[in-house]
Amino acid sequence: MTEREKMMGEEKISSVLLKLSIPAIIGMLVNAIYNVVDTAFVGMLKNTSAIAAVSVAFPMFIMIGAIGLMFGIGAGSYISRLLGEKNKKLADQTASTTFFTSLIFSIFFTIFGVKFIIPILKMFGATDTIMVFAKEYSKIIMFGSTFTIMNMTLNNTIRAEGNAKYSMMAISIGAVINIILDPIFMFAFDMGIKGAAVATVVAQSISFIFLMRYYILKKSYIHISIKYFSPCIKIYNEIMKIGVSTFARQALGSFSLGFINLAAKAYGDAAVAAMGISLRVFSLGMFVIFGYNQGFQPVVGYNYGAKKYERVKESIKVSLKWTSIFCIIITIIFNVFAKEIILVFSKDMDVVMIGEKTLRVMSMLFPLFGFQQVYAVLFQALGKGKEALTLSIARQGIFLLPAIFILSKLFQLNGVIWSQTVADFLTLILTSILAIRLHKEIKEKNTNQGV
């Protein structure tokens, strides 16, 4: 038994979760910082339309990440289960197939995105005054999208083998470089909003080099090589049955943000800027949960594959407790300091007024966000594609898109502000129903095993 297998299958659950989730949380927070830092520095330009431009580009950034997460999380879930089953050969083939497929796909996506950048930005809510800045910023981000996609893919394949610390280091290095380069390119080189985009792409490329170093220097347990490239139906099916649900969740999140921008733009650039700032700040809390779940997924996936159902149940219990406590603390912070938080990004009082209200409303149901996301990821980790897909498209699609459309018609800007909270409430009901069914299934397997 390898050291990793002993850790995943025998070490105390709380200890394993901390070892894998803390680096992942830092990695996800750092990823969120890319967007938050850009917004903060663009805010120094004291131009509401420029801030709104970054808000309009945010859904595009999420869409780029969605592609990488589709390959990365889909492969990561399968690799974790394969390692639990002691099938390293197929794990090597899965990692290699994922890497080369993701690389090819990302190049085609970059070409498509650059060619159609203006229609994409219009779809995400760019007005004529916003478009000037949004095009400058987004075109450069799109040119660097291959690095972003590959980073998301490699981060998750590395985490799947239990080395979350290395992936955290790779992303953290990129974030620190981004923070350093933003003011240099924007102000010292007088590049303005374009400088923020260049800094982001340079930082992402350095993270990619660091991630590739892990495999090139053979520090990995799983190996990536062209000789393991095996584009067969079985591997793609396993990757995509989980990856598609991840992509659906992220892509719908992207479209939903775009839809929010479209609904908000009728109330001016200040409304678009305020919604974008609030969503970015709110994403810091969300990304901590996403990061935790990236540590939770391989633990629960490995033990499910190894038929250690008591460890699966304990992983769920601990995760629900920890994520709920965190979400309650963040909700209090967002409500008490909402105005001060928005003022960090903009001094425009129209932006501050709308953003302050939006942040408070959006965080109303955040105490239950941990519960919602733990089960969404749990279904992915256990290879239950149908349930994972259902939850993925529910919060940001089935419930949110109609909520934005209906509430904005009935209550104007207030309707736009309340739409995510309404969607979260409906998603919680659906999650509870699917969670009850899952626990019955795990209990039956435990009984049949004689545990």
Image (cartoon, helix red, strand yellow):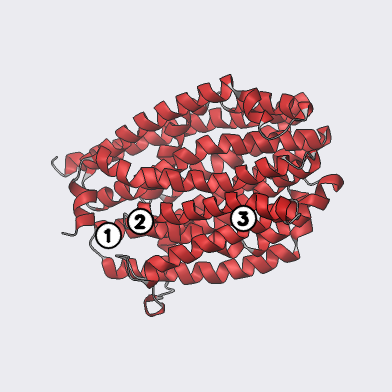
Give the residue at x 50% y 51%. Answer: 246
Name the N-terminal-most of marks 1 and 2: 1
Give the secondary structure at mark 3: helix
Q: Residues within 10 Å of mark 3 (few under 14, many from 20)?
A: many
Amino acid, disc 1: Leu
Decide which of 175, 115 is in the foreground and name it.
175
Give the residue at x 55% y 40%. Answer: 394
Residue 76 in sight in this render: yes
Q: Which mark is residue 83?
A: 1
- Cα distance between the residues tagged 1 and 2: 9 Å
Give the secondary structure at mark 2: helix
Residue 377 in sight in this render: no
- Residue 116 lies left or right of residue 184; in this view the side is right
Give the secondary structure at mark 1: helix
Q: Which residue does the numbered mark 3 point to in the structure image?
A: 200
Name the N-terminal-most of marks 3 and 2: 2
Decide which of 267, 135 is in the foreground and name it.
135
Residue 260 percent coordinates (x, y): 71, 38
Give the residue at x 60% y 61%. Answer: 202
Residue 14 percent coordinates (x, y): 27, 37
Amino acid, disc 2: Ala
Residue 5 percent coordinates (x, y): 21, 55
* C-beta proximity under 8 Å, tags 1 and 2: yes
Q: Residues within 10 Å of mark 2 (few under 14, many from 20)?
A: many
- Residue 358 lies left or right of residue 372; in this view the side is right
Q: Which mark is residue 160?
A: 2
Q: Residues within 10 Å of mark 1 (few under 14, many from 20)?
A: many
Amino acid, disc 3: Thr
